[in-house]
Image (cartoon, rainbow, N blue to C red):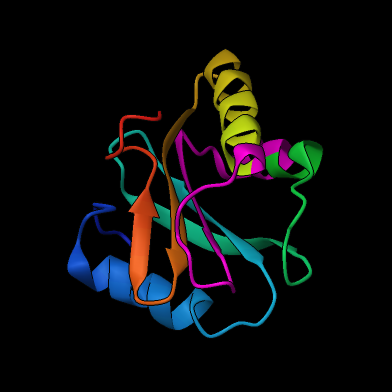
């Protein structure tokens, strides 16, 4: 479906894919979508599966995977089983730490999307990236 296509995180089809993939889970899950320099989809992988209220992301394995794939861009997506798609303070802190780390590797965090209920919050569109 996404292979070889330019990814637009505002595309309704992509957002529906995230709602179907993440929105039905009772536990928080974190999905990484890897992109090349032209924002073309390389692949998507589960980065972490947590508990009801939180998921912890390990940076080292993520960075290793980015380098292995030759990715130049990353989109993060995770769910909030509570139904509220607004980012928590921890979501914001972790996102900004990762963003700085990726910059140092000549890779960029294109967006961090949070799925909750029927909504999806984009940190990029909200001006938080």
**On screen, residue 124 above or below 35:** above
Residue 114, image x and y in percent? 47, 57
Q: Is residue 13 left or right of residue 1?
A: left
Task: Please give the name of the residue rendered at 27% of the width and 40% of the height, measured from the top-left corner.
Answer: 125
Task: Confirm whether the magenta stretch covers residue 21.
Answer: no
Residue 1 can be seen in this image: no
Q: Which residues are magenta?
A: 63-90
Residue shown at the point (30%, 38%) measured from the top left = 126
Query: Dividing the image into 4 quarters, which one contains the N terminus?
Result: bottom left
Count up the numbered dots: 0
Quarter of the figure with residue 98: top right
Relative horizontal placement of residue 68, taking residue 59 as reference (left or right) = left
- Residue 129: percent from the left, percent from the top? 40, 28
In this view, 98 is above or below 106: below
**Residue 81 position within the rendered picture, expressed as x and y whole percent measured from the top left:** 59, 74
Going by the image, does 7 lie left or right of 49? left
- The image quadrant that residue 47 belongs to is bottom right
Asked if residue 6 is positioned above or below residue 63 in the image, the reply reads below
Residue 73 counted in the magenta span? yes
Q: Where in the figure is residue 19, as x and y percent of width and height?
A: 40, 76
Viewer-proximal residue among 108 and 114: 114
Residue drawn at (54%, 37%) of the image = 70
Picture layout, residue 71 above or below residue 121 = above
Q: Nearer the viewer, residue 116 or 35?
A: 116
The reply to whether residue 58 is visible in this rendering is: yes
């Amino acid at each position: 479906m996404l292979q070889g296509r330019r990814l637009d995180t505002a595309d309704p089809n992509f957002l529906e894919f995230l709602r179907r993939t993440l929105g039905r889970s009772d536990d928080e899950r974190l999905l990484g979508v890897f992109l090349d320099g032209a924002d073309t989809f390389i692949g998507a992988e589960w980065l972490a599966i947590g508990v009801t209220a939180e998921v912890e992301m390990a940076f080292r394995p993520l960075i290793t995977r980015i380098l292995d794939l030759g990715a130049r861009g990353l989109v993060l997506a995770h769910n909030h089983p509570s139904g509220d798609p607004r980012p928590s303070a921890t979501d914001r802190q972790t996102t900004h730490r990762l963003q700085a780390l990726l910059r140092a590797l000549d890779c960029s965090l294109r967006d961090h999307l949070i799925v909750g209920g029927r909504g999806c919050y984009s940190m990029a569109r909200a001006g938080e990236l």
